Amino acid sequence: VQQVESGSGLVQAGGSLRLSCLASGTYAMAWFRQAPGKEREFVAFITWGGGDTYYADSVKGRFTIARDTGKNTMYLQMNRLKPEDTGVYFCAAGDGGVSSNQYHYWGQGTQVTVSS
């Protein structure tokens, strides 16, 4: 199983960015992020079929997670970005849930920087 993220960038506050993760295998998938000097935190997850999604309160209403199983690709559409969204974003595959311990496969991470 391999995860490869893409879509990193620098945007101004209020802007948008879409991250993609190319992944193989029939797993639930998630996005986590890690800001400098902070622990990795949960952002969102989606079940294998895409029928269920769950978001951290800090991104609810601004971020949308989706997947295209035919393309083995998961997306994170990020709107109304805030400086506190800055960090390295990781995609992960596993059992689902909000804990990093529930995920077995991780991408290398992609940088998102939001300027104020």
Image (cartoon, rainbow, N blue to C red):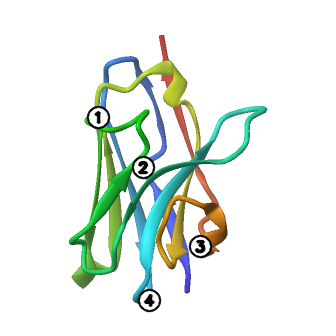
For the residues labelled 2 and 1, say whether their Cβ atoms are less than 8 Å apart. Answer: no
Task: Report the residue at 43% width, 33% height from top.
Answer: 58
Q: Quadrant of residue 37?
A: top right
Residue underneath mark 1? 62
- In this view of the protein, which residue sits in the foreground, 105 or 56? 56
Sequence-first disc among 3 and 1: 1
Secondary structure under tag 3 reads: strand
Separation of disc 3 and disc 4 at Cα? Answer: 13 Å
Q: In the image, what residue type sits under mark 2? A: Gly
Callouts 3 and 1 close, C-beta under 8 Å? no
At label 1, the amino acid type is Arg
Q: Earlier in the sequence, mark 4 or mark 2?
A: 2
For disc 4, the marked residue is 25
Amino acid at circle 3: Tyr
Q: Nearer the viewer, residue 102 or 71?
A: 102
Cα distance in 3D space between marks 4 and 2: 21 Å
Kindly identify which residue carries mark 2. Answer: 7
Q: Residue at x 46, y 56 (%)?
A: 6
State which tag comes first along the sequence, 4 or 1.
4
> Which residue position holds label 3?
103
Neighbor class of circle 2 (other Cα within 10 Å; few <14, some 14-19, many 20+) is some
Quadrant assignment for the N terminus:
bottom right
